[in-house]
Image (tube, rainbow, N blue to C red):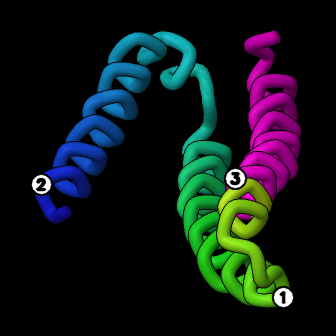
Amino acid sequence: MFGGLGFAVFLFISVVLYLLVKNKDEIKKVSNRNKLFVAVTFVGLLIVSGLTIYYAGNWLAGFIGNGTLKFFFQIIWMLIVIALLNIIWETVLNRVKRDSGIV
């Protein structure tokens, strides 16, 4: 299990580093205040998504007795949480881009 988790963490870090290097010219245009805002928002959304998916998802799935339905509910719950937090993330990025004159 830890091998798969370690690979997922490695993959996540690799993708983030790749995107940072790929967009370094746009990142230079952003003020330090907005960089900090984006970093704090990113970490906050990761924490909120993890807690919401794990704790709220398990609590809500506890009301479902059928194992198959519970599995499908958990998948749908993850997609809902990811979609809602993606809307927040896109709003933050659009605001920072607009303030920095990138868009």
Mark 2 or 3 closer to N-term? Answer: 2
* Disc 1/disc 3 C-alpha distance (Å): 15 Å
Q: Which mark is residue 75?
A: 3
Amino acid at dot 1: Phe
**Residues at badges 1 and 3 in contact (C-beta under 8 Å)?**
no
Was residue 84 drawn as part of the magenta stretch in this picture?
yes
Provide the major secondary structure of the magenta segment: helix
Mark 2: amino acid: Gly
Q: Counting other residues with Cα less than 10 Å from the Cα at mark 3, is it few (<14), some (14-19), or many (20 or more)?
A: few
Reading the image, the residue beneath label 1 is: 63
The residue beneath circle 2 is 3
Question: Is residue 74 visible from the viewing direction of this image?
Answer: yes
Q: Quadrant of residue 30?
A: top right
Q: Secondary structure at mark 2?
A: helix
Given residues 31 and 15, the one toward you in this image is 15
The percent coordinates of residue 70 (x first, y second) are 73, 69
Q: CA distance from mark 2 to mark 1?
A: 32 Å
Give the structural element (helix, strand or loop) at label 1: loop
CA–CA distance between discs 2 and 3? 23 Å
Which residue is depicted at the point 17% across and 54% down?
A: 6
Please state the extent of the stretch shown in magenta in the rendering: 74-103
**Few, some or many residues within 10 Å of mark 1 (<14, 14–19, 20+):** few
* Cβ atoms at labels 2 and 3 below 8 Å apart: no
Q: Confirm whether residue 85 shows in the render.
A: no
Picture residue at 82% right of the left edge, 10% below the top: 103
